[in-house]
Image (tube, rainbow, N blue to C red):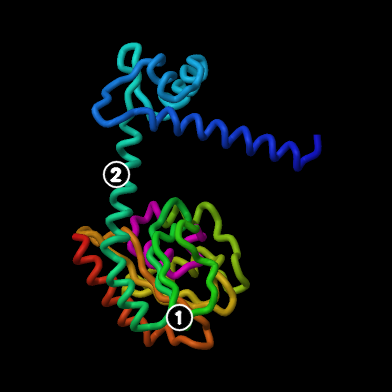
Amino acid sequence: MRTAERNHDVSSGDAATAARLAALLAAFRPGDDALGVSELARRTGLPKTSVHRLSQHLTEHGLLEHDGTALRLGLKLFEIGQLAVRQRGLVDTARPLLADLREATHNTVHLAVLEGVEVVYLDVLRGPDAPRLPSRIGGRFPAHATGVGKAILAFSPDGVVDEVLSGGLPRISRRTITSPALLRRQLAKIRDEGTAYEREESSIGTVCVASPILDAAGHAVAAISVAGSVNRIRTERLAPAVRTTALALSRTLR
């Protein structure tokens, strides 16, 4: 079998398995407490043997739980759902302020959170004067190479920063910071000033200024940034607007 055919078969199998797992979880309806294998098979159209095998995998990961001989949704799903609700609430709350920031700067505005050693972009409002950027909603980028990532890391517990450093600092562009000592010095300065700068570290020709969104304990829960072309924006001039928006959003979310 050629490599392309083998990869296609693996991808097809993965997709089919994911569809069956999703069907099992979606079989539970409002008012359902626990369902037996036979009822799950009837609702999903899957063979009982498949339901039994797939449910074992789901229970191992906490997505389903045993209730006698029946099954019910696991607490892990509740935890994931709470994360989704919080992120959706963050986006909805931030959107008006981000729209105002885009209108004022005419450049692209980002909202991102940290997940592991990467930032995940929850919202991207592209500005009319902004160049095409690699960021997209749902996209990921190494935290150390972005303004939002550095803004979050500067106001995160030491263990979070240590995790990023222990994984190495891969070079994304020729200007990416790859020295742990230099990154730590930058994070200390960001803590003092409340703003972070990214100067062509994620892509050549792009710069940005970012500020963290803080909880009541002073820890970053997210960050916002304004990004644009190195030849068209002056990040230091935009810093007060970004910082003010981040502070307003921090107060609103508390």
* Tag shown at residue 14: none
Q: Residues within 10 Å of mark 1 (few under 14, many from 20)?
A: few
Bounds of the magenta segment: 140-160
Q: Is residue 153 visible?
A: no
Q: Nearer the viewer, residue 67 or 36?
A: 36
Name the residue carrying label 1. Answer: 128
Residue drawn at (28%, 70%), measured in percent from left and top? 96
Q: Quadrant of the N terminus?
A: top right
Q: Is residue 247 left or right of residue 76?
A: left
What is the x, y in percent for residue 246?
29, 71
Residue 171's spot in the image, x, y percent?
Answer: 60, 64
Q: From the top left corner, tell me how far across and down residue 230 is, in percent.
A: 52, 83
Q: Secondary structure at mark 1?
A: loop
Q: CA distance from mark 1 to mark 2?
A: 35 Å
Of the residues shown, which amino acid type is indicated by label 1?
Pro
Q: Does 45 appear above or below 79? A: above
Which of the numbered marks, if any, corresponds to residue 82?
2
Image quarter of residue 42 = top left
Q: Using residue 49 as the reference point, say whether residue 241 is left or right of it.
A: left
Marks 1,2: beta carbons within 8 A: no
Q: Is residue 3 magenta?
A: no
* Residue 61 vs residue 9, the one in the foreground: 9
Task: Based on the picture, tell me whether residue 155 belongs to the magenta stretch.
Answer: yes
Residue 245 x/y as whole percent:
28, 74
Kind of element beneath mark 2: helix
Q: Identify residue type, mark 2.
A: Gln
Residue 37 makes an appearance in the image: yes
Identify the residue shown where x is 50% and y is 58%: 140
Quadrant the C terminus occupies? bottom left
Q: Residue at x 38, y 65 (%)?
A: 111
Please tell me which residue lies in front, 158 or 214: 214
State the residue at coordinates (33%, 48%).
84
